[in-house]
Amino acid sequence: MSIPVECDNAIVAHAAWKAKFRAFLSGTLTLDPVVVEKHNGCDFGKWLEGAGRSHLQAAEYARLHKLHAEFHRVAAGVVRLKLGGDVKGAQAQVEASGAFSKASAALTREVVVVRDTKR
């Protein structure tokens, strides 16, 4: 697949994380923080570590890799908060001013930049 298509897929997938985390916080979905934290386990992470590494410039790859890993680290932190009994703390991280939302937005912005330079 082309870089713009992979970037579009990543944007859609990361937007879906918000809904997934709301379901997790409401108790209708179970998440494992160890699995969530693995930044190379999702489709974008697999692409980034594989074909993306060879198709992106070194600086693009480095920025995306850093932001993607940070997103997964923060997402796992939300899971750990809730599983540890701090539901309000977990919910706060998913709100617009929370670390989860900020990490997601930063990653999405960078994916858009990379996508737009490859069109």
Image: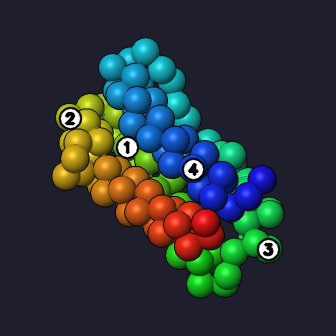
- Identity of the residue drawn at 55% across and 35% down: 32
Q: Are marks 4 and 1 in contact (CB under 8 Å)?
A: no
Q: Quadrant of the C terminus?
A: bottom right
* Mark 3 or 1, closer to the camera: 3
Q: CA distance from mark 2 to mark 4?
A: 32 Å
Disc 4, SS: helix
Disc 3: which residue: 54
Compare marks 2 and 4 and give the one earlier in the sequence.
4
Q: Amino acid at mark 3?
A: Ser
Q: Residue 16: percent from the left, percent from the top?
A: 47, 35
Compare marks 2 and 3 and give the one earlier in the sequence.
3
Compare marks 4 and 1 and give the one earlier in the sequence.
4
**Quadrant in the picture for residue 26:** top left
Q: Residue 11: percent from the left, percent from the top?
A: 51, 48
Disc 4: which residue: 8
Q: CA distance from mark 4 to mark 3?
A: 18 Å
Residue 8 visible somewhere in the drawing: yes
Q: CA distance from mark 2 to mark 3?
A: 41 Å
Q: Amino acid at mark 2?
A: Lys
Q: Are marks 2 and 3 in contact (CB under 8 Å)?
A: no
Disc 3, SS: helix
Describe residue 59's horizontal placement relative to residue 41 as left or right.
Answer: left
Labelled disc at residue 88:
2
Labelled disc at residue 78:
1
Q: Amino acid at mark 1?
A: Val
- Identity of the residue drawn at 35% across and 34% down: 82
The extreme top residue here reads 28
Disc 2, SS: helix
